[in-house]
Each structure stands twice: as C-alpha cells, then as structure tokens.
Image: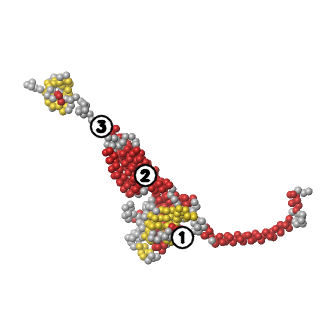
Amino acid sequence: MLRPYKRIRQCRTFKCEGGTSVRQFGRRKINWLLPVMVLLGLVLSGISASAAEGGGTSSSAGATVYVVEADRSVDSGLYHYLKRAYEEAEEAKANRVLLVLNTLGGTVSSALDIGELIRESKVPTTVYVQGKAVSAGTYISLNAQQIVMQPGSTIGAAAVVDGSGTLIDNPKTISVWTEEMKSAALLNERDPNIAAAMVNTSLVVELKELGRTKEKGDILSLSAQDAVKVGYAEYTAATLKEALNGLRLDQPNVVTYEPSVMEKIGEFLTHPAVMTILMIIGIAGIAIEFMVPGFGAPGIIGMLAFILYFFGHYVSGFAGFEDVALFIIGLLLLLSEFFIPSFGILGILGAASLVSGVLLAAPNPKSAVLSLAAAVVIAAVIVIIVAKRFAHKGVWHKFILRDQLTNEQGYRSSMNKSDYFGQRGIAITPLRPAGTIRIGEARVDVVTLGEFVQPNAEVVVIQVEGTRVVVRQLHENE
C-alpha cells in the first residue's frame, strides 16, 4: 500500500482512480477559470475608470475644514493664536483652513509672521472677510490661496502709519512694504499693481475692470464686488455657511477651532480695562504695604495683580521672560531704596525698570502708557487716603526716632548755664579767646569777645546762649 505522498506523485504520471489524470483535470479547471478572471479584470478596470473620472468629488467627500475666527487686531497675540490653530489643523490632516477675518490692521511685524505661517502651512487657506480686512489684514488675506468676502466688507488701505494713525512718508519703509504686498499678491496670480496701490499714495493705477483710476494721493480700497471683479476675491458669501458651500466640498467635516482655557484667560486679562485695573491694584497694593507693619494683605494682593498681568500677557504671546525679569528687577530695586541709602538712584532705576517691563509686555505701547498713567494717578489717590488713615504706621517709622526729649517732660540734654549770667569767676587757663574758668566749685568752658585773658585773672559772665558762655575780664576799678 502506497503512502499518500507517494500516491500523489504516482498520480502525476499515471491515471488515478476514476480514469482521469492530473494533467487532464488541470486543463478542465483552466478552461472555466480563465473566463472568470477576464470578467473580473474588466469589472475592476471599469471601477477604476469611473473613480478616475470623478476623482475630484471623491477626494473632497468628507474633507475636513477648520474654521478659525480672527476678529481682533493684528499683533503677536493673534500670531500665536493662529499658530496653535494651524498646528492643530495639520495634526488633524485637515483639507482646508477657513480663516474668518475681521480686523482694522495692526503691526507690520506680526502681519509678516502670520503671512509666513499661512504660506508655509501644509493646509491651504481660504480667507473669509467679514467686515474689514484693511491694512495688515490685507496682507494676511493676500497670502491665502482663496479670498471670499461678505457683501459690504472691504479690503485694502494698507498704507504704513504710526501709532497715532499718521501716514509714514519714509520712502524706504514704503518701498519695502509695497514689495511685500506685491509679492503676496503674486503668490496666487493677483494683480501686483493693485496691491501696490493699496500702499503707495504716489502711484497712479488704472482699474480697467472697474472703469476708474486710482489717483495720486489716494489709498486704494476695494469693496466685495470690486474685489471679485479685479480677481482679488473668488466669490462673495453673506454667511459662513455660504462661504463653506462655495468651497464645493461634498459633505465637509467642519471643525470650529476653539481657543484653549488658557487662551481665553489670557484674552480676558489683556483686555485694556482689566489690564488697567490690575495695574492699579498692583501699584496701590505694593505702596500701601510700606504703610503697615509686616508683609500683609496689601502686598500679597498687589503682587498677585502684577502676576496676573504678566501671566495674561505671557499666555497671549505678548510678554516674554525678559519682560517679567525686568519687572522683578525693578521691584527689587524699589525695595532696596528703603533700606540702602543711594540718594534716590536705586529708586529711579527701579521705577524705570518696572515701567519698562510693563510697557514691553503690552501689545500696544501707546495704550499701555495711557493705562499706566491712569493707574498711577488712581493708585496715588488710594495711597494718599490710606496714608492719612494709617499715618501712625509704616516701615519708615522703624528707622526714625519720633520721641521728643523736651524740658517740659523732664529731659535735660545738658546743664542749664543760664544761672551763670552776671557771676564772676577766675580764669584757670588762658582765654585765647576760649578757655576754662572756675565759678565757685564748677569748671565752666567759656569764650571771650576776642580779648586775651591771662590765667588767674578775674572775669564776669556777660552773655549765655545755650551752652555758650561769654565772659570779659574785670578791671581793677571794678
């Protein structure tokens, strides 16, 4: 009896039971398997062809869109906020960021940082202008792949101004910013001359699509409809939903980016009103602490107010460690002024360091100066009121002798010499003009009016002023 594997080997050459050889069985199997494989291949190729024809729709189905709202000034805080939003969008492998923008502008440096962030992001950006995207907001919009505008919104007016809103006429500054705007426009094939007309007042630009010309001395701004006509906006959308529908994504997965709890706290603490209140509490609290003995509630509350001030600015991206360090150094210098005599030098340096730390941490130095000035005035009023109420207390009283040693209270700083007036004495030492005389049993230091008196000469007291006793020599006939 053959083993199974030997039987199989034998069947490969000879006939097996049933009268069919292995080779004959293989041919029959191939005869019906081949048509099935051909049919399956045709079906698969048909599916691939249909997928290729509708590839745009298939790839957009279920696309993730991150909606990020930016309704604020363009500053370093907005940059850090958008940076975190784009990082989250990239981690989620989003297909698009819809940046809802409404801003009157801000700092050029922050606009450049945000523009670079949009350009280098792996997720393409569509800016939806709600209201205004002027000045630095225009530059941010030009860096996006698409611009959608709400009817009634505007874009443009990107001239460089100072903190008071006055146009800067520095040719170098205008030239650099003009080139930045033109480069941003060219990124997505927008007319660079229009971007330049939004910056440079000296340019004359013909707007053929609008049937008008931007004259010299004017700054170009575009409405939503005009922006579409000149190719600066793809379409208009009255609502956010319309803006999303215009992206032509099939059933998009819309994710609204929500700032973190820390970001919300930072936004609250950096509000101008809250910022001013914190500075008032901080300045008044620390000043009042010097009016009560020990380190108590006023000092703690004042320190907490300043900690909250810098914490809010640090979380929002306005303040760095160097600003906090500068403030702490200023505070320590002010404290040192009370214990180390420096003729006011430490106090001046401390105040300058403290003020510098506060101003450098603020997003807008001009508004920070106004807030600080208001805080100083209000805190001064509070300090004066507290000083009158607690005038008998204060750390400086520990260094000042307040008791008065008067004669009425029985204190005598020295012997009362008024009784010597008119008395006579004998000079013990030469009086040149000062010396010593003897009056009774007492030795008294005296002076003359300039005359020289020999020892053993008789003198008389003619004047007593406190401890000063004035004498003159008696003559023989006296």
Asked if the residue under mark 2 is in contact with the one under mark 1, i.e. CB atoms within 8 Å, the reply is no
Identify the residue shown where x is 49% and y is 62%.
69
Residue that numbered label 3 is attached to? 402
Residue 314 is situated, as x and y percent measured from the top left of the image, at 46, 53
Question: Can residue 334 be seen in the rendering of this structure?
Answer: no
The amino acid on which the numbered mark 2 sits, given as a three-letter code, is Tyr
Q: Residue furthest right?
A: 1
The amino acid on which the numbered mark 3 sits, given as a three-letter code, is Arg
Placement of the C terminus among the 4 image quadrants: top left
Few, some or many residues within 10 Å of mark 3 (<14, 14–19, 20+): few
Which image quadrant for residue 41? bottom right
Residue 422 is situated, as x and y percent measured from the top left of the image, at 14, 28
Residue that numbered label 1 is attached to? 246
256 versus 471 height, above or below:
below
The amino acid on which the numbered mark 1 sits, given as a three-letter code, is Gly
CA gap, disc 2 to disc 3? 39 Å
378 versus 335 height, above or below:
below
